[in-house]
């Protein structure tokens, strides 16, 4: 079975009462993607350089390295990661690391810092590539390899999964792997929801490309740190006003970690912290809350 069914109805006019801890009006998750070193590269057998989500952009180089592209990614692991990490450490805030297995392997210092931070780990595949056309057996192997490497480097297995560019087999393979509380390969809602398509209930914690610093390099994107702050502040304010919602803010060290953008993240964190009844939490904690408070209601 592959992921083919769609649900265009969802919660409709009457979403469930989230009942966030301590009566919070909104749950916020900051998810820092750690991908640097796992992007497309001819040394990894990809046949071309990486062409997306970095400063120079353009077409990939076929059969050749692109040193500009490479160094843009290297900035994320060498400098941006530490700058973003400090933002959360200085404020004592919980967050999530969306970790690509190979990227962690290539930077043991970052892996150790993640282990020490208390952040939960949201597995992001073995490579930061498009899995849409990958053979099923290879994708299955990548999932196993990712889990094993994160457990080896961080000291605990990931309980969430997000490929980002999944295949039609991804969700089924993640469920078959076992050990996951949820996956986030969906952008379909402002609340977690249950999927019943694979023989047992499976929790989905939707991710977001909307409230995401990748929009610095996407259509209708951001230019300055203030663009990032204002858009994400407005999204937060509306969901806070509605109450009982969840917002995920996606981050990349090579993007928001630049000196000219990091101020936007700082202002966003401070704005959220200044409001009453805001839960800034880890994805694992949000998933466990939803499972306990809104367990599945049917078996198929």
Image (cartoon, rainbow, N blue to C red):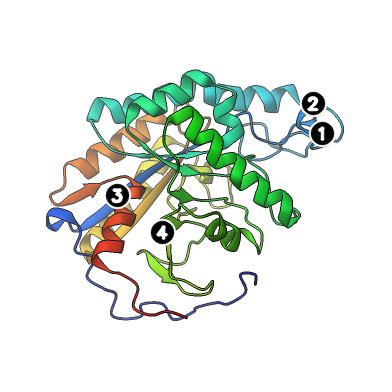
Residue 205: image tag: 4
Say whether residue 53 is visible.
yes
N-terminal of the pair, mark 3 or mark 1, is: 1
N-terminal of the pair, mark 4 or mark 3, is: 4
Residue 288 spot, x, y in % from top left: 30, 55
Cα distance between the residues tagged 2 and 3: 41 Å
Residue 132 spot, x, y in % from top left: 70, 56
* Residue on which disc 1 sits: 61
Residue 285: image tag: 3
Cα distance between the residues tagged 3 and 1: 42 Å
Residue at 55 percent across and 77 percent down: it is 6
* Residue on which disc 2 sits: 65
Q: Which secondary structure lies at badge 2?
A: loop
Cα distance between the residues tagged 2 and 1: 7 Å
Q: How many marks?
A: 4
Q: Which secondary structure lies at badge 1?
A: loop
């Amino acid at each position: 079975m592959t992921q083919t069914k769609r649900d265009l109805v969802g919660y409709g006019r009457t979403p469930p009462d989230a009942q966030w801890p301590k009566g919070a009006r909104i749950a916020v998750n900051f998810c820092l993607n750690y991908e640097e070193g796992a992007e497309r590269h001819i040394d990894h057998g990809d046949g071309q350089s990486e062409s997306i989500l970095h400063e120079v952009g353009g077409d990939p180089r076929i059969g050749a390295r692109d040193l500009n592209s490479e160094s843009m990614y290297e900035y994320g692991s060498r400098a941006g990661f530490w700058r973003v990490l400090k933002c959360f450490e200085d404020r004592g805030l919980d967050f999530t690391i969306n970790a690509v297995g190979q990227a962690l392997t290539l930077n043991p210092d970052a892996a150790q810092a993640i282990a020490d931070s208390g952040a939960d780990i949201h597995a992001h595949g073995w490579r930061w590539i498009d899995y849409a056309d990958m053979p099923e057996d290879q994708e299955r192997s990548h999932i196993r390899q990712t889990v094993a490497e994160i457990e080896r480097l961080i000291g605990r297995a990931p309980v969430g999964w997000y490929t980002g560019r999944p295949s039609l087999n991804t969700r089924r393979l993640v469920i078959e792997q076992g050990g996951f509380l949820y996956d986030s390969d969906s952008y379909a809602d402002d609340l977690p929801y249950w999927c019943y398509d694979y023989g047992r209930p499976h929790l989905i914690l939707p991710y977001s490309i909307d409230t995401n610093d990748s929009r610095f390099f996407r259509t209708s994107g951001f230019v300055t740190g203030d663009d990032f702050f204002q858009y994400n502040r407005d999204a937060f304010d509306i969901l806070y006003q509605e109450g009982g919602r969840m917002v995920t803010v996606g981050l990349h060290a090579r993007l928001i970690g630049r000196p000219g953008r990091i101020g936007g993240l700082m202002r966003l964190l401070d704005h959220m912290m200044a409001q009453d009844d805001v839960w800034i939490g880890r994805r694992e904690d949000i998933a466990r809350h939803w499972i306990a408070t809104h367990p599945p209601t049917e078996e198929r």
